[in-house]
Image (cartoon, rainbow, N blue to C red):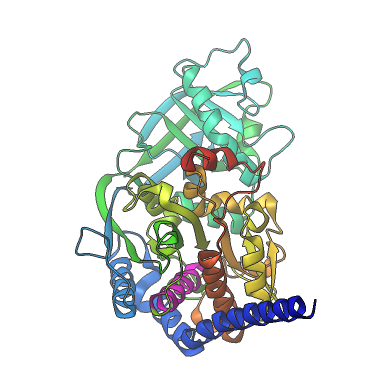
Amino acid sequence: MKKSILSALFLIFTISISAQSEVDKVKSTVSKSEIEGHIYFLASDELKGRQTGSAENKIAAQYLANMLRGYGVKQIKDTNSYFQTVLLKKTSAATKTIFKAGTLHLDKILTIASVNTNYTGKAVFLNHGLEEDYKNIDVTGKYVISIVGTKDNKDIRSAFSKTKEKMALAKEKGAVGFIEICNVDDATWGRMEHYFNGDKMDVAGENEDSGTFSHTWINDQKEEISAAFDKKNEIDMEIVVEGIQKRDVLSQNVVGYIEGSDPVLKNEYVIYSAHYDHVGIGKAVNNDSIYNGARDNAVGTVTVLSAAENIAKYPTKRSALFILFTGEEKGLLGSKWYVNHPVLPLHQMVYCFNSDNGGYNDTSIATIVGLGRTTAQKDIVDAAAAFGLKAIDDPAPEQGLFDRSDNVHFAAKGIPAPTFSMGFTAFDEEITKYYHQVTDNPDTLDYEYLFKFFQSYVLACRNIANNPETPFWTEGDKYYDAGKKLYQK
């Protein structure tokens, strides 16, 4: 009995020492000053917001590759480079947009489909543009105008999720174009314009508007378009969209790897990922037009650099693949490209630990979007606790954040893929004050908090990569069956 008690105490002591040594390994490489230096460079005015396809985006990529090289991270196998070329198609913004109906003249127009058009003719008003609204109405050769969203839900985010379906329906019914009208304040409209009316990109060969079907949104703040249809369902209208052009663009993901230390587990890889691009230069606010993207996503990029430095010095049992994506802000393009052109077989990737951020409003926590969706939850919670933070799951599921970052492309393939984010308890004013704003600068960050946040991420990486049990989705998750198929479970 006495011997078994001593054995148990020895085992507990051994586990404690082992856990402490992992913490010490993290502490030995994660430096507050180094974190600060990386972020100040990546989010500097000189990099002009790191827009995908820009010269400054390429400078950021070269900087990241040099960091990986300096840490001893290996280049992509069978290549001599840390760069994975990403082929994109760039569509320029329209130079002219006009809507006219009688004396009504509006120019607050979003080009949802990147198509030039010059139409004069009939427009039919179809309520919300759903199947039931077309009953006994012929729209062939005409424009369809409808209200965004549905009768029960006009929330802008929900309306955007419905818009593709409604456009396809209008096209199927024979319309030549589709206009949706909304009524939003100037600040909201400004954010929508920045996203839709700037240059757009997609992976080359995908989702390219090859026809002439035009799809636009108009901000009808005084509800003048609706009034024009008063007591009739057809009006004469004119819409002009001009200046849209398309060209090929080359960008790059930054990729490197470290082989694991265990002879068996090294055949399994954990991906550590973040996007390094941001939204570039946009509408000036207080004479500042550079959207520096310190939170989104210089912080996430540097979290992955911190993991790379640590794991290169102290290899984990599982191998590590570091991927820094381009084009996230243009529609998750770098990660979309990667999962279709992986440098290593996807079935060897047992986890993708993504890092992406919009902002923070609570420096006592780390928010992991999808924390409870994988079996690695305890590894992450314990890591955060070791550095004085509490790990919480997504507090704003209505925002659909899990499906709005690069992790979702890996999840769709079956790879467990949560996103490690700075602490937020709601998508409130403190978040929107910086999210995709010119105010998101390096000097507005709390680096004492970031020091704990970065250490927590790196320790979580180590915990996941050293855990004898291979992580997986929790049973019943949306992507559980995709995981079973990928890993042939």
Task: Please name the predominant secondary structure of the magenta segment in the image.
Answer: helix
Relative to 395, is 116 on the left or the right? Answer: left
Q: x and y percent of residue 81 in the render?
A: 22, 64
Question: Looking at the image, which residue is at 20% across and 60% down?
Answer: 79
- Residue 82, by quadrant, is bottom left
Q: In this view, does 346 lie above or below 55?
A: above
- Magenta range: 296-312
Q: In the displayed orientation, state which residue is furthest to the top.
A: 136
Q: In the displayed orientation, state which residue is furthest to the bottom.
A: 33
Question: Looking at the image, which residue is at 49% across and 39% down?
Answer: 488
- Residue 386, by quadrant, is bottom right
Q: In this view, does 195 lie above or below 263?
A: above
Q: How many marks?
A: 0
Front-most of residues 245 and 166? 166
Question: Looking at the image, which residue is at 34% across and 72% down?
Answer: 64
Q: Is residue 102 shown to the viewer in this render?
A: no
Q: In this view, does 8 lie above or below 105?
A: below
Q: Quadrant of the N terminus?
A: bottom right
Relative to 241, is 475 on the left or the right? Answer: right
Q: Let me know if residue 300 is in the magenta part.
A: yes
Q: Is residue 380 shown to the viewer in this render?
A: yes
Q: Is residue 11 above or below residue 330?
A: below
Q: x and y percent of residue 91 in the render?
A: 33, 46
Q: x and y percent of residue 332 in the render?
A: 44, 52
Q: Let me know if residue 267 is in the magenta part.
A: no
Front-most of residues 144 and 476? 476
Front-most of residues 238 and 291? 291
Front-most of residues 341 and 217? 341
Q: x and y percent of residue 445 in the render?
A: 56, 81
